[in-house]
Amino acid sequence: IVLPKFTEVLLMPTLLSDSFSLALWSSQNHTLTVTVASLIPAETATNLVVRFNNSFLTLPPNGLVQVSNTISLRLSSVAGLSFDYFPLTFRGLGFEQSSITFSPAIAGRPTSMSIRLVSQSLIARGQMVEIFLEAFTGSDVFDLLVTSDFTAPIYFCSWISQERTLKCLIQRDISASNPFVIRWPDYAGVALPEQGVNEHGPNMIVSVNTNTGSKVFQQGVQEFNPVGALKYAYLVRNETDFGTLWSVNLMSYMDIALNSSISIDFSGFDSSL
């Protein structure tokens, strides 16, 4: 766990968790390494509590996560494999605490992520929470984040690939010190992207129907990866007496709720075809 604001802490921190047996602090790279003492089942939230009781240490105000601070998580397996997961920076708002939960893993990659936040002050409806995902370097990431239900204060976030930022609109007021959770769920076994790239999503297939028959081909838009909830999408062009008729056929892994929005980027499509 990388804590960049810490420069000097107790070399042997005190662990207050039965799931972990050892904690070591490296002041050179600002990293806290803990050893798992017992099996942590998949889809089980685990709290890691570490007490730093060094009298010379000044903790960051209001907890570990604050504006312009980043906490990143790295998991290492017994086999020596390691995975870097989603350094987070919260912009524009102060938070008293946060926790990040991953579960379960497919081929070493998590299939869901939960971010639990507690704000220092009231977050009014209509405000935007921005979460900077420093590890995301690609653009082919899922666009949809939802919480457990549509009555939650946040049920949709937009991913801005150029800024590597999640922008989450607040749907109702969140009082200070009131925890809320953003969940990135797994849809039909599609794993979360590694380094921002979704390698498991299907490519977009362009199907063109002409007067002389049908032709199926792939072109510039083949780089399109549907969002996590979308199983496939393909484009159909029909030449009719009234001109060219375009349609997009979609199949979703999940129900598409009323007032949902679907965005399709045609920037790579050659209209001359």
Image (cartoon, rainbow, N blue to C red):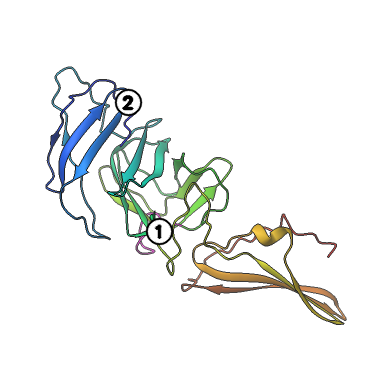
The quadrant of the picture occupied by the N terminus is top left
Percent position of residue 240, x then y: 84, 80
Question: Where, by quadrant of the figure, is residue 31 drawn?
Answer: top left
Residue flagged by tag 2: what amino acid is it? Lys
Q: Position of residue 54 (x, y in %)?
A: 15, 22
Q: Tell me the residue that label 2 is attached to.
A: 5
Question: Does 148 appear in magenta?
Answer: yes
In terms of depth relative to the viewer, which is nearer, 13 or 80? 80
Q: Counting other residues with Cα less than 10 Å from the Cα at mark 1, is it few (<14), some (14-19), or many (20 or more)?
A: few
> Looking at the image, can residue 120 be seen?
no
Report the front residue among 210 and 123: 210
| Residue 266: assigned label | none
Out of 259 and 103, give the one closest to the viewer. 103
Say which residue appears at 23% left-offset and 29% top-offset.
25
Which amino acid, mark 1? Ala
> Can you name the residue that lies furthest to the front here?
79
* Tag 2 secondary structure: loop
- The stretch of residues the image draws in magenta is 145-155
User: Is the magenta region chiefly helix, strand or loop?
Assistant: loop
Whichever of callouts 2 and 1 sits on the residue coming sooner in the sequence is 2
Of the pair 176 and 61, the residue shown nearer to us: 61
In the rendered image of this protein, does residue 103 appear above or below residue 19?
Answer: below
The answer to whether residue 228 is left or right of residue 235 is left
The residue wearing badge 1 is 107
Reply yes or no: does residue 43 show up in magenta.
no
Q: Is residue 162 left or right of residue 247?
A: left
Asked if 143 appears above or below 36 in the picture, the reply is: below
Residue 132 placed where, x, y %?
Answer: 46, 40
Q: Residue at x 43, y 67 (%)?
A: 187
Pinpoint residue 89: horizontal percent, then vertical percent: 41, 37
Residue at 21% over, 51% down: 46
